[in-house]
Amino acid sequence: MLTVGDAFPQFTCHACNGLTQNDLISLNSESFGDKWKLFIFYPKDFTFVCPTELVEFGKRNADFADRDVQLIGGSTDNEFSHLAWRQSHEDLATLPYPLIAAQKLANDLGITTDEGVCLRATFLVDPNGVIQWASVNNLSVGRSVEETLRVIDAVQSDELCPCNWKKGEATLSV
Amino acid sequence: MSQLDAIRNALPDAAKDLKLNLQAVLRPENLTGPQTWGTAIACSFFLKEAELADAIIADARADGASEELIDDARAAAAIMGMNTVFYRFRHLVEKPGYAQVPARLRMTRMAQPKTDKVTFELMSMGCAVLAGCGLCIQSHEASILKHGLAESHVNDAVRIASVLAGVAVALAMDA
């Protein structure tokens, strides 16, 4: 499995970004410009733990947006399955981020199980495409949005001010 | 009449030196026009002088200053409002333990200037001088020189900060 410091794989994926056929789109590594990206992988559409978790992330979308983070959900299901799931589940109707069909990407990341589904893996990718946080939960364990935001704050909070300077330092890395 | 001229004319006679200095320091010499305006705007924000800031921004816009420059000045003043408190504490307490723990304060905007790094540093320099922290001043001065400017540029930024501080005092008087 890829981890912190690795380049996130280049990808082009079909995705479902709404409730109609017109919301079936294609996304790639460049789709979100210089935003940070948080990939939330889950095992299967139409299961029970997954929507709760995805919906919780969706409810806090503004907090992620404040941190310049684009949320992206994904599993090894295809985009039509994502669409059918979103149409059939009230809480997923207003999900404010896309779900990608990540068959190849999940393999490239090394997060598929023997059954071929995604582990409950989370990747934080910086604007340069480098993984800054990678975490995997057992399939039965949901993720914490608060913990995710805490990690993002910590990763993004470099002490960038020259005031963070200790007397005697010859050079500054600013 | 420019908005800054109106401010200058509102200064009491006793502060005539400030009136003349204000005009002089905003006339770019070593710094570029945008660097001069940017530093002045950031300092006026840092001084919480809304009326002064409005006037400087109006004249800066009339002189072609970009919205990006003004936004960088907002960012620099706000972040330096935080950092000159936090890091001044670290500098003044003089106990190494505090420097070993992460600040856990976001300051990402510092790394994303909409204009350029050295302009943002000049704005920060003005704020550091106004806050009066020795190590903050030393570190921002070193950073500006590292970005290729000279002591004369730093000196101009400090003159701008000093004059605006004096103008703010004078403006608060009954004329």
Image: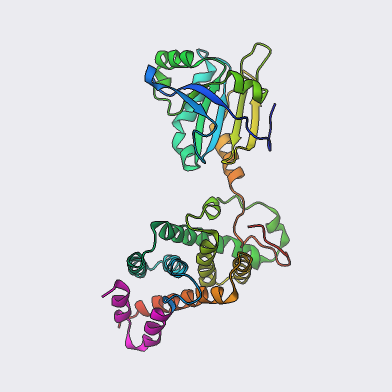
Residue nearest the viewer, comparing A3 with A6: A6
The stretch drawn in magenta includes residue A45: no
Determine whether A127 is above or below A123 in the image: below
Question: Which residue is situated farthest in the bottom direction here?
Answer: B14
In-front residue for pair A164/B2: B2
Residue A21, compared with residue B153, is above or below; it is above
State the extent of the magenta-drawn residues as a range.
B1-24
Q: Is residue A149 left or right of residue A19?
A: right
Q: Residue at x 33, y 79 (%)?
A: B8
Report the front residue among A50 and B21: B21
State the quadrant of the C terminus of chain A.
bottom right
In the rendered image, which quarter is residue A142 located in?
top right
Residue B79, given in percent of the width and then of the height, sits at 51, 58
Number of callouts: 0
Q: Which residue is drawn at the image coordinates 69% and 12% (left, top)? A: A114
Query: Which residue is found at the position 47% from the left and 70% from the top?
Result: B32
